[in-house]
Amino acid sequence: MHRLAILCALVCLAAPLAAKDSLGVYDSWAAFRDADAARCYAIAKPRGQEKDGAFASIGSWPAQKIRNQVHFRLSRAVPAKSAVRLRIGSTTFPLAANGRDAWAEDARADAAIVAALRSASAMRVSGNGFSDRYDLAGVATAIDAAVVGCAQRR
């Protein structure tokens, strides 16, 4: 029942107006494919934050040749060019942020972040008075399911 609740919450978070195909729920993470477009992603909510709309996602858009792009919806808006950091294990990554959104600085940073996610148990996004913590159980499987889900669509 807990997984079903997570799945329902993540579907609502991701994009309420677009149809989604579930690719699976993997512990703290889930994977989805947009029904109308070739976009697939792994997604999770931060620990203990049910109502603020914050989430982490790793998305792929094969038609645009984008694979495993990291995106965060922050629990609190930050001014443009604010210092927002992602900490995975002992490694810290700077993020580009504006309002409630933050991304890796470039495709190379996306790849480094995804590699770090695969071997860690938790991550934290913080800056300007907020700290969003995520469990990483299931992240690797959810990322892989999203990539395969888009590859099968082609």
Image: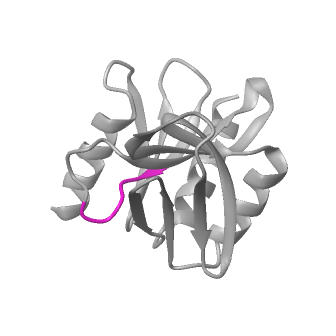
Q: Residue at x 42, y 34 (%)?
A: 21
Please tell me in which quadrant of the rendered image residue 26 appears: bottom left
Q: Residue at x 73, y 51 (%)?
A: 110
Please indicate whether residue 83 sits to the left or right of residue 72 in the image.
right
Residue 115 locus on image (x, y percent): 73, 67
Q: Is residue 62 magenta?
A: no
Colour scheme in the image? one colour
Q: Is residue 64 above or below residue 121?
A: above
Q: Which residues are magenta?
A: 43-48
Q: How many marks?
A: 0
Pick the residue in front: 95 or 142. 95
For the N terminus, give its image quadrant.
bottom left
Q: Is residue 50 above or below residue 134?
A: above
Q: Is residue 81 above or below residue 86?
A: above
Please tell me in which quadrant of the rendered image residue 132 appears: bottom left
Outermost residue to the right = 108
